[in-house]
Image: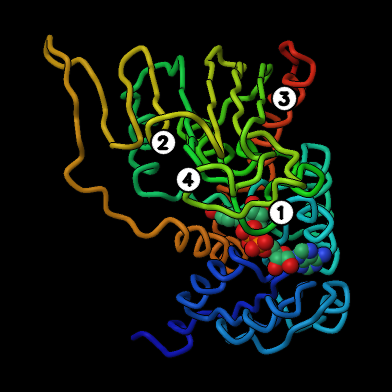
Amino acid sequence: MTTASSTTPKPFRVGFIGAGGIAHAHAANLKKIAGVELVCAADVSEKGLENFKEKQGIARIYSDCQEMLAKEKGNLDAISVCTPNGLHAPNSIAALQAGLHVIVEKPMAMNAVEGQAMIDAAKKAGKQLVVGFQWRFDPKTTVLKNQADAGVFGNIKYVRVQALRRRGIPNWGVFGRKDLQGGGPMIDIGVHVTEMAHFVMGSPKPIAASGMTATYIGDRSSTEIASMWSGWDHKTYTVEDLAVGFVRFDNGAVMVIESSFAAHIEKDVWNFQVMGDKGGSTFDPLQIFTDYNGQMWNNTPGWVGGDDNFYLKMKHFVEVCRDGRNNVSSGEHGLMVQKILDGIYSSAVAKKEVTIN
Ligand SMILES: NC(=O)c1ccc[n+]([C@@H]2O[C@H](COP(=O)([O-])OP(=O)(O)OC[C@H]3O[C@@H](n4cnc5c(N)ncnc54)[C@H](O)[C@@H]3O)[C@@H](O)[C@H]2O)c1
């Protein structure tokens, strides 16, 4: 017989550092998970914080995250870090040192040195560090990963990653500030598709990268440029509009990454293509290409199932921290992705291929 106690999930108490756009998505999805309690939030924006409190039903709010961590000692199990990229490492480390599990938004940090410090802090604290990559939980990614693991692609030789916006420069937050974000589209949206493609490839180790970045629209006023999202701050825009990277992995495979906030292309693209010696695929539309019985086949799944990828990411976080599930979006994985980004950006400056350690 099932008893009440065996079906009631353990409480999981979450606080937030950063209460802007993506924190709302965290909170809304966490509220769908049984046992989760949204306890408190800290943000430097009073208006944003009040809005977050009201919309998400947060009990207590703070203008300073250190004060929150001190005053809420004993009231929390975990922290969701949703600040700009430059604050991911200090905020995550502060929360880990306070003895709390952490989910940190992507990219995990500004660079791999910060990422490593976060991993070290998690190890020292004996707490979980989950990097908020939702696309690896996408049902289509799951299909492709299962096919890759079953050997459908054979040896994966080449992966082409595209996270391209024709004209989509963020007009909120600090996404145009290199000092606060670490870069533009490559670190902001390229990271998503790179991460899911790298996961499908079986997470090989990146060993070298070559890259190019270019800025030609974001540093001009949006009043003089056609755009669906107008009003970005061109005066503080110090990131790239377009970045291209070529990455070598230890297993001989290579990846090309194209990412843009602004590019002269027909339409936006969110896709990756796998090319192996036995088969290939595209993410969007989801298709698998193989030879079968002497002919070339394009295969489309009839149904992929699954759930919303953002909900699955938050559910994974809770299950890892509360229920001991294996962390498949760990700091170690985030660090490998961060090394790819670092390699591309430093090669763009050096104008030659760089080694990734
Ligand atoms: N997973 C995704 O699909 C996704 C989508 C959008 C953004 N993000 C990531 O989420 C993070 C935040 O992006 P956003 O769109 O929510 O930006 P945002 O500007 O809407 O929110 C950031 C919040 O952080 C607050 N903040 C700034 N400094 C702070 C400090 N010292 N202490 C506490 N709060 C502080 C800001 O006031 C703001 O409310 C970024 O790292 C971004 O890359 C992820």
Answer few, some or many: residues within 10 Å of disc 1's Cα (few below 14, many 20 plus, some between 14 and 19).
some
First in sequence: mark 1 vs mark 2: 1
Provide residue 336's location: percent of width, then percent of height.
67, 34
Mark drawn on residue 136: 4
Q: Which quadrant does ligand 1 occupy?
A: bottom right
Q: For disc 1, does the CB lie below 8 Å from ligand 1?
A: yes
Q: Is residue 73 left or right of residue 216?
A: right
Q: Which residue type does callout 4 highlight?
A: Arg
Residue 312 image position (x, y, % from top left): 45, 59
Residue at figure coordinates x 59%, y 65% from the top left: 21
Quarter of the image where one finds residue 88: bottom right
Q: CA distance from mark 1 to mark 4?
A: 25 Å
How far apart are the two marked residues, 3 and 4, measured between alpha carbons? 22 Å
Judged by depth in the image, the label closer to the viewer, 4 or 2, is 2
| Camera-nearest label, 3 or 1 | 1
Disc 2: which residue: 269
Q: Is residue 67 left or right of residue 7?
A: right
Residue at image mark 3: 343
Residue under pointer 1:
174
Distance Cα–Cα, label 4 vs label 2: 17 Å
3 or 2: mark nearer the eye: 2
